[in-house]
Amino acid sequence: MKRLFLSLVMILALATQAFAAEDLVVGVTPFPHKDIMLVAKPLLAKDGYNLVIREFTDYVQPNMALAGKQLFANFFQHEPYLDNMNTEKNLGLVSIGKVHIEPLGIYSKKIKKLSDLKKGDTVSVPNDPTNEARALRLLEANGVIAVKPGALVTVADIISNPLDLKIHELDAAQLPRTLADVTCAVINTNFAGEAGLVPAKDALTLEGKDSPYANIVAVRADDKDSPQAKALMKAVQSAEVKAYIEEHLIPKGIMPAF
């Protein structure tokens, strides 16, 4: 009888292990990426996966952690940024799908419109290559400066600066804090939202809806066709996530990309 009991215990233990949810560790930046993943979490649970969300506050470590196999996937960046990091660091990461678009915006606590800029005013922009280029192109599109042709342009590529603006390159997460010190700042929507700014209301101007910078989910190349990757994208590109974006994020300037 004792042997039978032990056998039953072992069978139950093995069955429990067989049906235990598999952890999927995904790195995110806080807003709106964490919020979107929280909507996807119960959907993944239905497919047998326990979504573990790991937060980052910068744009470098999520890719390094993914390449180092500390994460299964990350969700914080657009594809041009990923392409640049792959080139610089030889990471071997790939996109498995688009989720949403976060238009870059120009914000200010000192002026009401860009035409109020004066000679010698200061502007802060992101210092990572792709977002700096986006920021400069946004300033150019609004007639503030002119920049050389090319993809990853920097301050050194400005060819016309009629107001002799002083442009400071800073870490993207720090840009909202500079608003008290600069005339205006070009800020990513997620960091603007974290700082209490509402892009649709507070931005002097935003990138257009045709922006190519949709935020993506990235994995290591070897995992791109895995069941886990397919389940993750099924949840993230679900009707539930789209409804969440449309109801809660569009008012903040964020649009679905699927």
Image: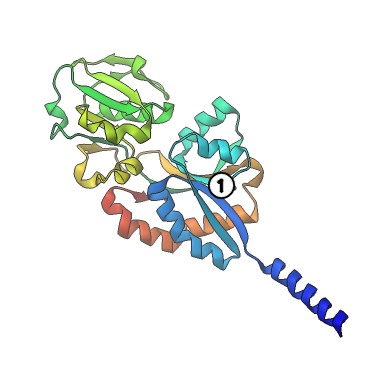
Q: Going 19% across and 27% down the picture, which residue do you hit?
A: 183
Q: Going 82% across and 81% down the picture, which residue do you hit?
A: 5
Q: Secondary structure at mark 1?
A: strand
Quadrant of residue 222 within the rendered picture: top right
Q: Is residue 32 above or below residue 213?
A: below
Judge by depth and name the residue closer to the eye, 227 or 5: 5
Judge by depth and name the residue closer to the eye, 168 or 233: 168
Q: Indicate the amino acid at tag 1.
A: Ala
Q: Is residue 219 above or below residue 238?
A: above
Q: Quadrant of the N terminus?
A: bottom right
Q: Label 1, on which residue?
A: 73
* Color scheme of the displayed model: rainbow
**Side of 1 where 252 appears, left or right:** left
How many residues crowd around disc 1 within 10 Å: few (fewer than 14), some, or many (20 or more)? Answer: many
Q: Going 30% across and 46% down the picture, which residue do you hit?
A: 193
Judge by depth and name the residue closer to the eye, 130 or 68: 68
Q: Residue 162 in the image: x percent, y percent?
A: 19, 15
Q: Residue 56 in the image: x percent, y percent?
A: 46, 42
